[in-house]
Image (spheres, grey):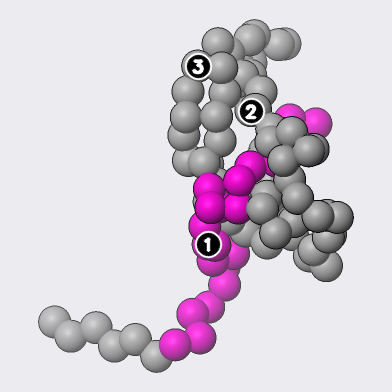
């Protein structure tokens, strides 16, 4: 359930994959990668826009939100999909016929 903090609703914290289940040593990404990630809280399971910060062969550390409202959680690798960064230009040449 969400909590109220300074007149704002804050979402429930996401569950994180335990350290023992993450696999090998975590590797930090040179730059955060924009992703879509499935996160689970005590009350919901949903997709959110986030950035990937660290990864192992089995799990990814994702962060959503920004500044003091940012939240991070380790999720299974298969629960993360790549997404384009805001303002990025597609490299492939797609033509749309009308």
Binning the other alpha carbons within 10 Å of mark 1 as few (below 14), some (14 to 19) or many (20 upward) gives some
Whether residue 60 sits left or right of residue 88 in the image: it is right
Q: Which callout, 1 or 2, points to the residue nearer the camera?
A: 2
Q: Position of residue 45 (x, y in %)?
A: 47, 29
- Decide which of 8, 50 is in the foreground and name it: 50
Whole-angstrom CA distance, mark 3 to mark 2, is 10 Å
Whole-angstrom CA distance, mark 1 to mark 2, is 20 Å
Where disc 2 sits, the SS reads loop
| As drawn, 50 above or below 19 | below
Q: Image quarter for residue 35?
A: bottom right
| Residue 36 at least partly seen | yes
* Residue designated by label 2: 14
- Decide which of 94, 24 is in the foreground and name it: 24
Residue drawn 29% across and 88% down? 95
Q: Position of residue 12 (x, y in %)?
A: 61, 19
Whole-angstrom CA distance, mark 1 to mark 3, is 26 Å
Q: Does label 1 or label 2 sit earlier along the sequence?
A: 2
Q: Does label 3 or label 2 sit earlier along the sequence?
A: 2
Residue drawn 52% across and 41% down? 38
* Residue designated by label 1: 83
Residue drawn 51% across and 86% down? 91
Residue drawn 54% across and 62% down? 82
Q: Are marks 1 and 3 in contact (CB under 8 Å)?
A: no
Image disc number at residue 43: 3
Image quadrant containing the N terminus: top right
Binning the other alpha carbons within 10 Å of mark 2 as few (below 14), some (14 to 19) or many (20 upward) gives some
Image quadrant containing the C terminus: bottom left
Where disc 3 sits, the SS reads loop
Region in magenta: 67-92
């Amino acid at each position: 359930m969400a909590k109220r903090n300074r007149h704002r609703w804050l979402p429930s914290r996401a569950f994180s994959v335990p350290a023992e289940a993450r696999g090998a040593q975590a590797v930090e990404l040179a730059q955060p990668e924009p992703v879509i990630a499935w996160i689970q809280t005590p009350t919901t399971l949903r997709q959110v826009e986030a950035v990937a910060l660290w990864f192992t062969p089995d799990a990814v550390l994702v962060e959503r939100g920004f500044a003091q409202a940012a939240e991070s959680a380790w999720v299974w690798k298969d629960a993360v999909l790549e997404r384009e960064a805001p303002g990025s230009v597609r490299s492939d040449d797609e033509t749309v016929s009308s």
